[in-house]
C-alpha cells in the first residue's frame, strides 16, 4: 500500500490474531535491517501499525491493525537491526481496569457495552451480542477490562476479540463458516493433542462468607460442668442473656485474655476457635448472673456462612473418572454468581479437550471464531468442524514464495506456562482488591493540560477563602473544634503563640448532574 513498508524491507514479520479462548491479545513482531541507522526515528511507541497481505503486488487485505508497544535496536559491528512489537487494539482492553462496579440482572452483552463505553478508548461495540444469558449479579474491583470481559464470556459461553476495524466481537462460540475444507490437499503439517488432565467433571466454587444471625438456647442441664456452652458455629458479635436476668445482656470478654474482678466485670468468655462460651464464676467477679438451676442461657451470635456451589457431570465421571476443580474467589458474594460460574465451567471442561495446530498451503484471510472443516483420517479427524481460536502469519519472502505462511490453532488452547502465570497474577489481583467497594471515597489527582471530565452521578464544586490568619495543624476547613498548636521555633513567654482562624463560609461555584 502507498506509504507502507513492503515485506522485502523486513527480515521477518509475524502476525497472530487471537480470540479470548487463546487467553491473549493479537500480536505482531517485525524485524528490519537498519543499515547506518536508516530506521532511527521511523517508529514511536503507540504508533498505529496496519499490516496488509495477499497475493497481489499491492496487497490490500488488512490482517492486523494495532499499536507499537516495544521498539528494540540491536546490532553487531555494522549489522544493525530494528525490531518493533505490538498488539492489536485489544491492548486497549488490557491498559485500563474496571473501577468498582456492580451489575445486576443484565445480559452479558449489555454489561460488556457499558464497560467498553466507560473504560476504553477507540473501541466500538457494533458486534457485541446481548444474547439470552442474563447475569444475575457480578462485581468487578479494579481488574483489567480484558479479564472482566473474559469472565463475562466464560459465564455466557461466548468468545470475544477485536477486529481490524477496532470493533469488539462478543458472540457465541462457533461463528460463520470459512467454506474451506482442510485435508491432505492443502495441509502441509498437522498435530492434534487430547489430554485427560484438562477434564474436570466436579466443580466447587467458593465465594466470600456472609454473617447470618443465629440463636441457641442452653438449659442449665445442657451446660458442660454447669458453666460451658458449646455452640454449633464459631461465633461473631456475641450477645448472651439468661432467663434469670432476661432484659440485661451479660458482659463478655475473650477467653485467655484476662478477667477483671469486682462488680461489673466480665461475666462470660468467648473461645472463637473452640465455639465455646464460658460463664465466669461468681467468686471471681463478686456477683454472678450465670443461669441458675432450672434456668437457661440465650446466646445470639452471627455465624459465617460460605457462598459455595458444587456441580457434577455423572456421565463424564463414568467415562473419565472423577476430576475435581476448586475455584476460590472472595469477590463472589452471591450464590447465583457462584452457580452460574460452576455451570459454565462444567460445560467447558467436562469433556476431553483437543487442540489442533495446522500449517496450510496458500494465502487466505481468516478471523478468530470462524468455523473450518477438517478431514484428516490418519489423525482421527473425520470431517470435523472446529473453531479457529488463533491465526498465525509467518511473513518472510521465502515463506510467501512457497505459500507456507498460515498456521491455525483450532478448538482449544491447552494450557502453557504463560497461562499459569497469567492466572496466578489474576488471582493475586483479586486477593488484593477483595476489600474494594463501589462505596469507597476516593481522592483523585490528575495531571493534564486543558479541560478535564469527571464521571460521577452528581457533583458540587465549593470554595471558601482564607483570611490573613489560619490555624496551623487544622484537620480540615469548616469544622469546629480546632487542634491548637504552637509555631515551631517561636519564643514562648507566658503562653503559646497561636495562629488565628479567619475564613469565609463555603460558596457553591457549580452543581448538577444528579440522577
Image (cartoon, grey):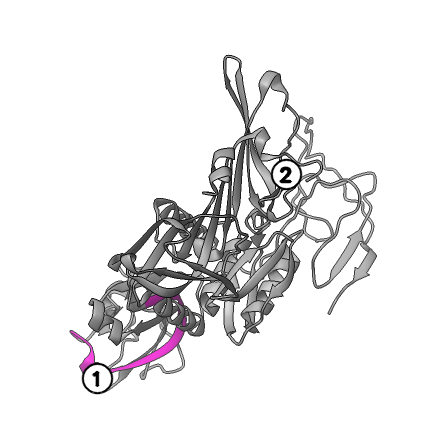
| Picture residue at 23% right of the left edge, 67% below the top | 283
Q: Nearer the viewer, residue 118 or 295?
A: 118
Q: Is residue 6 left or right of residue 135?
A: right
Pick out the residue farthest to the front.
Answer: 185
Mark 2 / mark 1, whichever is N-terminal: 2
SS majority, magenta: strand
* Residue 514 forms part of the magenta stretch: no
> What residue sits right under mark 1 in the picture?
293
| Residue at screen point 58% across, 34% down | 7
Q: Is residue 499 above or below residue 321?
A: above
- Give the secondary structure at mark 2: loop
Q: Quadrant of the C terminus?
A: bottom right
Residue 175 as seen in the image, left or right of residue 123: left
Q: Nearer the viewer, mark 2 or mark 1?
A: 2
Q: On the image, numbered disc 2 is attached to which residue?
A: 46
Alpha carbon separation for disc pair 2 and 1 = 80 Å
Expressed as whole percent of the image width and height from the top left, the position of residue 217 reads: 29, 82
Q: Quadrant of residue 114?
A: bottom right
> Is label 2 in contact with label 1 (beta carbons under 8 Å)?
no
Query: Where does the magenta region start and end?
Result: 204-225
Pinpoint residue 335: horizontal percent, then vertical percent: 41, 73
Label 1: element kind: loop
Let me know if residue 247 appears in the view.
yes
Amino acid at each position: 500500500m502507498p506509504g507502507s513498508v513492503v515485506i522485502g524491507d523486513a527480515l521477518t514479520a509475524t502476525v497472530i490474531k487471537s480470540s479470548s479462548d487463546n487467553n491473549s491479545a493479537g500480536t505482531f513482531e517485525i524485524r528490519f535491517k537498519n543499515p547506518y541507522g536508516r530506521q532511527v526515528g521511523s517508529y514511536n511507541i503507540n504508533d498505529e501499525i496496519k499490516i496488509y497481505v495477499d497475493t497481489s503486488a499491492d496487497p490490500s487485505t488488512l490482517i492486523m491493525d494495532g499499536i507499537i508497544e516495544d521498539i528494540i535496536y540491536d546490532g553487531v559491528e555494522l549489522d544493525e537491526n530494528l525490531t518493533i512489537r505490538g498488539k492489536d487494539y485489544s491492548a486497549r482492553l488490557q491498559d485500563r481496569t474496571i473501577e468498582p462496579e456492580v451489575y445486576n440482572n443484565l445480559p452479558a452483552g449489555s454489561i460488556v457495552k457499558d464497560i467498553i463505553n466507560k473504560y476504553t478508548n477507540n473501541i466500538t461495540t457494533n458486534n457485541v451480542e446481548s444474547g439470552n444469558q442474563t447475569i444475575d449479579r457480578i462485581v468487578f474491583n479494579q481488574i483489567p477490562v480484558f479479564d472482566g470481559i473474559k469472565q463475562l464470556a466464560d459465564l455466557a459461553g461466548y468468545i470475544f476479540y477485536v477486529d481490524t476495524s477496532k470493533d469488539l466481537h462478543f458472540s457465541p462460540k462457533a461463528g460463520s463458516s470459512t467454506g474451506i475444507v482442510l485435508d491432505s490437499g492443502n495441509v502441509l503439517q498437522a498435530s492434534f493433542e487430547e489430554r485427560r488432565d484438562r477434564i474436570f467433571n466436579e466443580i466447587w466454587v467458593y465465594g466470600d462468607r456472609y454473617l447470618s444471625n443465629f440463636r441457641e438456647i442452653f438449659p442449665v442441664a445442657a451446660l458442660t460442668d454447669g458453666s460451658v456452652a458449646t455452640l454449633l458455629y464459631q461465633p461473631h458479635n456475641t450477645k448472651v442473656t439468661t432467663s434469670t436476668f432476661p432484659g440485661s445482656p451479660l458482659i463478655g470478654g475473650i477467653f485467655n485474655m484476662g478477667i477483671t474482678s469486682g462488680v461489673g466485670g466480665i461475666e462470660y468468655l468467648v473461645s472463637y476457635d473452640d465455639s465455646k462460651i464460658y460463664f465466669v464464676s461468681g467468686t471471681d467477679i463478686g456477683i454472678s448472673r450465670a443461669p441458675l438451676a432450672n434456668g437457661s442461657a440465650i446466646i445470639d451470635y452471627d455465624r459465617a456462612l460460605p457462598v459455595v456451589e458444587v456441580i457434577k457431570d455423572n456421565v463424564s465421571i463414568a467415562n473419565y473418572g472423577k476430576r475435581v476443580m476448586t475455584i476460590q474467589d472472595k469477590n463472589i458474594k452471591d450464590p447465583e454468581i457462584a452457580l452460574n460460574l460452576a455451570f459454565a465451567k462444567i460445560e467447558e471442561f467436562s469433556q476431553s479437550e483437543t487442540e489442533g495446530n495446522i500449517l496450510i498451503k496458500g494465502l487466505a484471510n481468516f478471523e478468530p471464531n470462524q468455523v473450518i472443516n477438517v478431514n484428516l483420517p490418519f489423525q482421527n479427524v473425520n470431517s470435523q468442524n472446529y473453531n479457529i481460536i488463533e491465526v498465525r502469519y509467518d511473513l518472510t519472502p521465502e515463506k510467501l514464495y512457497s505459500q507456507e505462511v498460515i498456521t491455525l490453532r483450532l478448538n482449544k488452547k491447552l494450557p502453557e506456562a504463560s497461562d499459569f502465570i497469567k492466572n496466578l497474577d489474576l488471582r493475586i489481583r483479586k486477593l488484593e482488591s477483595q476489600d474494594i467497594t463501589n462505596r469507597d471515597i476516593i481522592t483523585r489527582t490528575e495531571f493534564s493540560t486543558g479541560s478535564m471530565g469527571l464521571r460521577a452521578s452528581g457533583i458540587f464544586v465549593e470554595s471558601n477563602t482564607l483570611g490573613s490568619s489560619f490555624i496551623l495543624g487544622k484537620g480540615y476547613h469548616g469544622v469546629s473544634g480546632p487542634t491548637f498548636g504552637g509555631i515551631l521555633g517561636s519564643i514562648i513567654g507566658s503562653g503559646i503563640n497561636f495562629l488565628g482562624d479567619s475564613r469565609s463560609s463555603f460558596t457553591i461555584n457549580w452543581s448538577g448532574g444528579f440522577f
